[in-house]
């Protein structure tokens, strides 16, 4: 009896076409998190041949993509957004199976529309060239703007957003393409089927827009050592990563050694400070708001409220009791993978080793799959300030309450914080909290990317004014955002300066005439006019 034929592995996208993996490094399948069983097709584990072929192919497309007209880039991004919307039902079904996230409202009504809106915002920025920031000094004969890197951008996508941060559809992808750079997408192995379907739509839209077919390479799985090797290749123009601090910093070290800029979104506990007036006025409502934010999406958001600072006293006690009641009664939720579940347990264990006490929840969850019950823990200001383990991220539906004696201890907690994506302050409607609010805002401002007044941090609007970034270690660089066009595009650009360069050799954005009506900084002020135009 002959041995059964091996299962056919899904292809990778390299060199402008879908083709079998060049390596025999193994295979993997997605897991259904609700049952902890493998599902779907077999995908290849790429080795060095795939990685090097993808890099060489992307490099070969860099000059041609950089030379493409902005209107063609915009047309591709808009067509891709429309294709995603046309295939929404199948995409949502795939993503729900691979992540256990709710099909509605989370995937179909929130994340997928956010993804297509993001692509269209990138298209508008590409067409209008608003990301290029032209500056002209006529007296000095100098003209500068932001321009394509003319090198590939390597993107590592996360597990928690199968659409909006996917390496082949999310903000990093849209930003890199809008800046006319080829993308090597290392999609997350937790949702390979979803990523493959998105990549098929993107590839078809690239061809239809007559952009270089090699503008996008897609790999599903790399051995960590090979990922580091690829991140440290000087042929890259930049690296983008969303995920754990440990993995992100390892990639950054490899990229730094090769002079490759690395834009990282890492861990964050997103501290929330509740002032006395807010607790007296609406403590019960705040407990519900906090609980809902902490457990939304089973807590698998980088803006999850991981630390909540609560004053001692009757109002604070009532808030803690109301929150504890909700955590204790909450059903178990399903996390993305065994690894995510294990990391959550390790994070909570680290808090407890540092002296935090369990307030509610945290019991073992029954049933199959990667289930977990929400957990609420408590500590005090002195312990929090003294032990950095208490501000380690526990990624999932877990939060640490820090009790403080008055505003001075709250300020000590704020001063001890590492860099975070967000920081929130809730004050009362009356004026009694105003001075404390201002003092806390001053302490938080250099430690957070986004300062929030009276709202939980979970939501991230796709807006030109958004900062989804912050000081280290929430990100690798405090001056850039992973969300919001055109600012996010500028991560993947180079500053080009022209010194007395003849007019016909200048990029269109820097010529005397301005037929596109681009806003330019000319001789000390912003204007839409041509150079030499009179009022």
Image: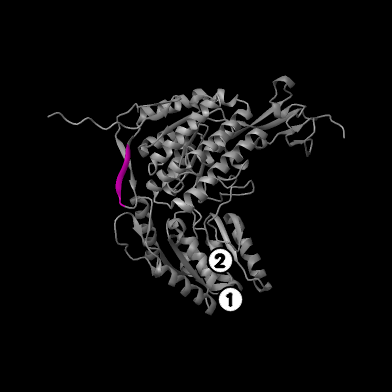
Q: Which class describes the residues within 10 Å of circle 2: few (<14), some (14-19), or many (20+)?
A: many
Report if residue 31 is visible in the image.
Answer: yes
Q: Which mark is residue 280?
A: 1
Report if residue 476 is visible in the image.
Answer: no
Q: Residue furthest left?
A: 1
What kind of secondary structure does the magenta stretch mostly adopt? strand
- Picture coordinates of residue 269 (x, y %)? 49, 58
User: Sequence order check: which comes first, mark 1 or mark 2?
Assistant: 2
Q: Residue at x 35, y 37 (%)?
A: 223
Q: Residue furthest right?
A: 535
In three-dimensional space, the C-alpha distance between marks 1 and 2, rounded to whole angstroms, equals: 14 Å
Question: How many numbered tags mark residues here?
Answer: 2
**Quadrant of residue 209 within the rendered picture:** top right
What segment is highlighted magenta in the picture? 35-41
Q: Which class describes the residues within 10 Å of circle 1: few (<14), some (14-19), or many (20+)?
A: some
Q: Nearer the viewer, mark 1 or mark 2?
A: 1
Quadrant of the frame with the N terminus: top left
Left or right: residue 91 compared with residue 131: left
Left or right: residue 72 compared with residue 305: right
């Amino acid at each position: 009896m002959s041995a059964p034929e091996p299962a056919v592995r899904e292809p990778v996208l390299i060199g402008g076409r879908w083709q079998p993996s060049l390596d025999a490094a193994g295979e993997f399948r997605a897991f259904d998190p609700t049952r902890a069983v493998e599902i779907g097709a077999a995908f290849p584990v790429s080795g060095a041949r795939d990685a090097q072929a993808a890099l060489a192919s992307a490099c070969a497309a860099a000059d041609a993509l950089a030379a493409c007209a902005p209107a063609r880039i915009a047309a591709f991004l808009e067509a891709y957004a429309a294709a995603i919307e046309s295939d929404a039902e199948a995409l949502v079904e795939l993503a729900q199976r691979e992540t256990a996230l709710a099909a509605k409202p989370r995937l179909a009504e929130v994340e997928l529309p956010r993804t297509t809106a993001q692509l269209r915002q990138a298209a508008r920025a590409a067409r209008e060239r608003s990301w290029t920031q032209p500056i002209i000094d006529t007296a000095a004969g100098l003209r500068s703007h932001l321009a394509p890197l003319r090198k590939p951008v390597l993107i590592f996508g996360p597990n928690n957003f199968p659409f909006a941060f996917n390496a082949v559809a999310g903000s990093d992808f849209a930003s890199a393409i809008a800046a006319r750079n080829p993308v090597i997408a290392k999609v997350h192995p937790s949702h390979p089927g979803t990523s493959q379907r998105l990549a098929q739509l993107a590839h078809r839209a690239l061809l239809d827009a007559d952009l270089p077919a090699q503008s996008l390479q897609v790999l599903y799985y790399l051995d960590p050592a090979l990922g580091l090797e690829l991140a440290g290749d000087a042929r890259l123009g930049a690296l983008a990563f969303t995920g754990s601090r440990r993995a992100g910093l390892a990639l950054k070290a490899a990229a730094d050694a090769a002079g490759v800029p690395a834009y990282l979104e890492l861990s964050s506990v997103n501290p929330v400070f509740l002032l006395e007036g807010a607790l007296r006025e609406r403590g019960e409502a705040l407990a519900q708001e906090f609980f809902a934010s902490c457990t939304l999406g089973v807590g698998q958001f980088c803006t999850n409220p991981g630390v909540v600072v609560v004053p001692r006293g009757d109002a604070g006690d009532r808030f803690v009791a109301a929150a504890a009641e909700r955590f204790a009664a909450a059903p178990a939720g399903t996390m993305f993978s065994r690894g995510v579940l294990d990391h959550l347990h390790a994070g909570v264990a680290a808090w407890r080793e540092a002296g935090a006490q369990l307030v509610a929840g945290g019991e073992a969850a029954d049933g199959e799959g990667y289930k977990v019950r929400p957990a609420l823990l408590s500590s005090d200001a002195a312990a929090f300030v003294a032990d950095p383990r208490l501000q380690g991220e526990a990624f999932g539906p877990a939060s640490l309450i820090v009790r403080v004696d008055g505003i001075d201890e709250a300020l000590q907690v704020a001063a001890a914080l590492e860099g975070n994506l967000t920081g929130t302050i809730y004050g009362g409607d009356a004026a009694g909290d105003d001075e404390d609010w201002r003092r806390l805002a001053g302490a938080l401002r250099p430690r957070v990317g986004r300062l929030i007044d009276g709202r939980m941090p979970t939501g991230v609007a796709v807006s030109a004014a958004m900062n989804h970034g912050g000081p280290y270690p929430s990100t690798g660089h405090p001056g850039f955002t992973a969300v919001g066009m055109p600012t996010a595009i500028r991560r993947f650009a180079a500053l080009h300066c022209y010194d007395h360069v003849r007019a016909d050799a200048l990029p269109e954005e820097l010529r005397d005439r301005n037929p596109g009506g681009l806003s330019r900084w000319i001789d000390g002020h912003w204007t839409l006019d041509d150079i030499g135009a009179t009022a």
